[in-house]
Image (cartoon, rainbow, N blue to C red):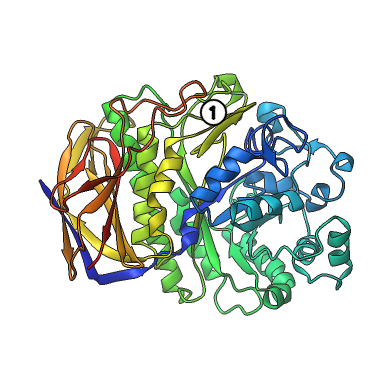
Amino acid sequence: MKKLYAMLPEELGTINPDIYGHFSEHIGGVFYDGLWVGEDSDVPNIKGFRKEAIEKLRAIKIPVLRWPGGCFAEVYNWRDGIGPRDQRPVRHNWWDYEDGRLESNQVGTHEFIDLCRLIGAEPYFAANITSMTPMDIRDWMDYCNSPRGTTTLALEREKNGSPEPFNVKYWGVGNETWGGGGEMTPEVYAHEYRKYAAVLYNLTRFMGGELFFSGANGTDSIEWTKRALGEMKNVHYSKMAGYTLHYYCGGMECRGFNTDEWYEQFRRADKMQQVIDKAWGFIVGYGMQDQAKLVIDEWGAWHRRGRPSQGGSGPSNGMNLYEQQCTMRDAIVVGLNLNMFNNNCEKIRMTNVAQLMNNIQSLFLAGGEHCITTPAYHVFDMFKGHMGGTAIRTAIENPSITFKSPKDGKEASVKQFTTSASVKDGVMTVTLTNADLKKDETISLEIVGGKAAGNAMVTVLHTEDPDTVNTFEEPDKVVPAAAVEMPLRYIKVPRASVVTVEVKLA
């Protein structure tokens, strides 16, 4: 039996609900025949979006949704996506060299705002600074947020069917500017950011917007972050509300993994903590911690064979670019990262898992009349009790598991468990992942500085075969068991599982 301590006096901060955010790019099957089926489709829909997905997204209380990219943003002109849909231009998509799909612009600003309102999420726009000017982005902000009946662009928005402002709060100034977003040096991007931010500054102040600085690739974050933030000291008109990072773990086969590949996935996922610590160290070092926190707006397990020519592991057999299946290994990656984000909540403003449907760490897989949830969706559902809660410190007897890294054959190790805990409205939520492929555990939950009002309610996500997936034919192979009452001192945690424990406090 292992002991897990939840220490009520040791508060870590408030878990911003936006830490549980999501990402939706115009790539592969995320929107077209994914989220978007069109208002005339035989597939049940609400304003053109899959009804089933809308209802399930409402259920997990998705707080924020990033759009339209990703790399797609580098070539996106927001004006292509307004006005009558039958008159919108068809363009080359950033990604059509991979899958041959053109961009129809059927989903534009108004449709995306409809989606956000339907699911109760705040919109987060990634602004194109690679091929559009600062005034282009200022015009988009004006179009979205100016009060009705004021500016020419507000009147144009009204003409296009939306009299009231969209109140888009979050604006990313560029995307992956170290790569596809311009291959800029940190100094060049900082110059571009200051230029764009200065032009947008008075509108964000007037209408309550926040600007995010497009930061480093997570694996190369030290030098890039140091140089970029060094250029941002002592600025006034171009302050940033967040510093963005991207970090993907993966690079192995999605399914059919062996024991070493199972554990290697978690070792790579756990590197996220290094990414957080290094970036936060520079933010504090430059005295920016009261101004800007971390925004990890792309993360997840990105596996091999996601291109159409490679067949893919998802139901479209590669037609949807970077579509992949989701096993219990991926579910544990989600739980591991969400526990980590909870425990670092004083450093993190927002995160956005990639992506919502039919792409990378998907919550849904869809096509035609089919729409199913993946194990990743269920982890978000199990963890939603943390949103807005006060994080508290946890400690657990946590042995290391050794294995041989598939990368170089050297011995490596991962911890068996990850944990986090929070308190909200008199209820303590504790979440765990158990990475051990062979060993079931019994946990004794010890509450330090408080008492439970009764037994715990425990929800478990687990399958006998960790390589099992949900399919269109069998959509419920990997789903949580119904919550079961258990004594705090005898909480069952199966091997290869994600577990949520809810306890009412006395």
Q: Is residue 202 above or below residue 99?
A: below
Name the residue tied to disc 1. Answer: 306
Q: Is 271 displayed left or right of 472 in the figure? A: left
Check the image and name the residue furthest to the left: 1
* Along the viewing direction, whichever of 383 and 308 lies nearer the viewer: 383
* Along the viewing direction, whichever of 254 and 403 lies nearer the viewer: 254
**Amino acid type indicated by mark 1:** Gly
Q: Is residue 177 visible?
A: no
In x, y percent, where is residue 308? 60, 23
In percent of the image, x 37 and y 25: which residue is there? 468
In percent of the image, x 75 and y 66: which residue is there? 165
In x, y percent, where is residue 222? 44, 57
Q: In this view, does 506 lie above or below 399?
A: below
Q: Is mark 1 on a helix, strand or loop?
A: loop
In x, y percent, where is residue 353? 50, 47
Badge 1 local density, few (<14 within 10 Å), some, or many (20+)?
many
**Where the C terminus falls, by quadrant?**
bottom left
Q: Is 13 displayed left or right of 435 in the figure? A: right
**Where the N terminus falls, by quadrant?**
top left
* Along the viewing direction, whichever of 284 and 151 lies nearer the viewer: 151
Q: Is 305 displayed left or right of 6 in the figure? A: right
In percent of the image, x 35 and y 38: which residue is there? 480
Figure quadrant of residue 155: bottom right
Q: Is residue 436 visible?
A: yes
Figure quadrant of residue 50: top right
Q: In this view, does 277 lie above or below 285?
A: above
User: How many marks are shown on the rendered structure?
Assistant: 1
Q: Is 155 displayed left or right of 219 in the figure? A: right
In x, y percent, where is residue 42? 72, 29
